[in-house]
Amino acid sequence: MTAVTQQNGSALRSTPHVGVNGNGSTATKDRAQAINPYAQPFALTAHYKATRDPAAAEAEQQSKDGFVPDLGVRLVCPECRNDPPNLVEEFASGDLVCGDCGMVVGDKIIDTRSEWRTFANEEGDDPSRVGQSNSPLMDGLTDQLDTRIGFRDGGTGAARDLQRAMGRSGGSQNRVILDAFEDIQRKCDVIHLPRTVSETAKHMFKQVEQDKILRGKKTDAIIAAAIYCACKTNKVPRTFPEICQLTNVSKKLIGKCFKEMQQAYGLNINHGDGSGVDAVSPTNAVDLVGRFCNHLGLENQVTRITEEVAKAVRNEGVLAGRSPTTIAAACIYMASILAGMTLSAKKISTAAGVSDVTIKSSYRELIKSKEKILTSAILTKYGSRIDPSRLV
């Protein structure tokens, strides 16, 4: 005989054990957020909600301030009534048993684990499954079966009419999102962006469409802004000219969509309660140096020297007001001269997208502050490779 008791209370959630490092932060959580693009969901900020709909924001605030009963259902053992309950699932018998007194609280429990049985006629492993794995990105977009109308109709034109009718009756918003997903993946593959960037960009585009922000903006502009935000969120910096060249969208239009996303989702805000995504910070020259040096085929040691020079330029405030691309190109030009390489400014301009005249003028500004840039730490670490007397 089984018995089930329900009480009002918060729903039970199993919290996995995570290790804590010496600094007091959870290492498992940080590693999961670095890999999983859905670790920090894009939610509308309270300020943006109040701006869009002040009445709804006020009602939500009143519900938070007032008393809200907790209507979550929680199973407890009717014998021991321990809180929290110690319930154990017996998968072999399909029972839910109390771990303290042994009473059967529920029966016929469905086992949701993977069933890796072999269904092949011959011996061997056959881990065949039916259907694809669940994806939080495609949740709600491909739940129903899809019907496709063929083109062969004997010349009667019935297939075309049926396709038009299906297009009018089908979900147009889901079709727009799925087409945008394909476009985002194609554009990210062109410039060899990692999968986490493409998944984050898809997730952001889906959230923008569901929250109905950026109304009236072109889909290409929203895609470009989503890719730009995803690159910054995943610490894979790309400049505005690169995104403009990739998507054929003007820099001004991408900037408008990007600023709207920042305000809506608080992408550049670090709240005290942990909400907000403090990741969309301005791109600096240090982040771009590695990519440009890779395009130029420079050695690893020259790349490290350039990064040290770029860090010193940033700390000393040299070339303040110049774009990060210009600063990175000038630092590469300076590091190549220090290392005794014959690397022309025109070749650097091709890789960085900055004119050689701008690189040389910025290089002359760096020479004026070479005592501040070439610190004793840099000279001691790379003294055998660099020669400051080459800077003329």
Image (tube, rainbow, N blue to C red):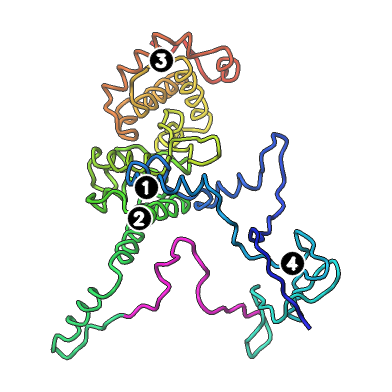
Single out the mark in the foreground, 2 or 4.
4
- Report the predominant secondary structure element of the magenta stretch: loop
Q: What is the CA distance from the residue labelled 3 to the residue labelled 2?
A: 37 Å
Q: What is the CA distance from the residue labelled 1 to the residue labelled 4?
A: 48 Å
Q: Amino acid at mark 3?
A: Val
Q: What is the CA distance from the residue labelled 2 to the residue labelled 1?
A: 8 Å
**In this view, 385 is above or below 389:** below
**Which numbered dot is residue 318?**
3
Residue sitting at the far front: 67
Single out the mark in the foreground, 4 or 3.
4
Read off the residue under disc 4. 76
21 sits to left or right of 220: right
Residue sitting at the far left: 156
**Which numbered dot is residue 227?**
1
**In this view, 356 is above or below 1:** above
Viewer-nearest residue: 64 or 264: 64
Viewer-nearest residue: 1 or 277: 1
Q: What is the CA distance from the residue labelled 4 to the residue labelled 3?
A: 66 Å
Secondary structure under badge 2? helix
- Give the magenta part as a residue range: 125-147
Q: Earlier in the sequence, mark 2 or mark 1?
A: 2
Viewer-nearest residue: 351 or 342: 351
Single out the mark in the foreground, 1 or 4.
4
Quadrant in the picture for residue 362: top left
Q: Amino acid at mark 2?
A: Ile
Secondary structure under badge 1? helix
Quadrant in the picture for residue 267: top left
Q: Position of residue 290 (x, y in %)?
A: 46, 34
Q: Earlier in the sequence, mark 4 or mark 3?
A: 4
Crowd class of label 1 (few under 14; some 14 to 19; many from 20; radius 10 Å): many
Read off the residue under disc 2. 184
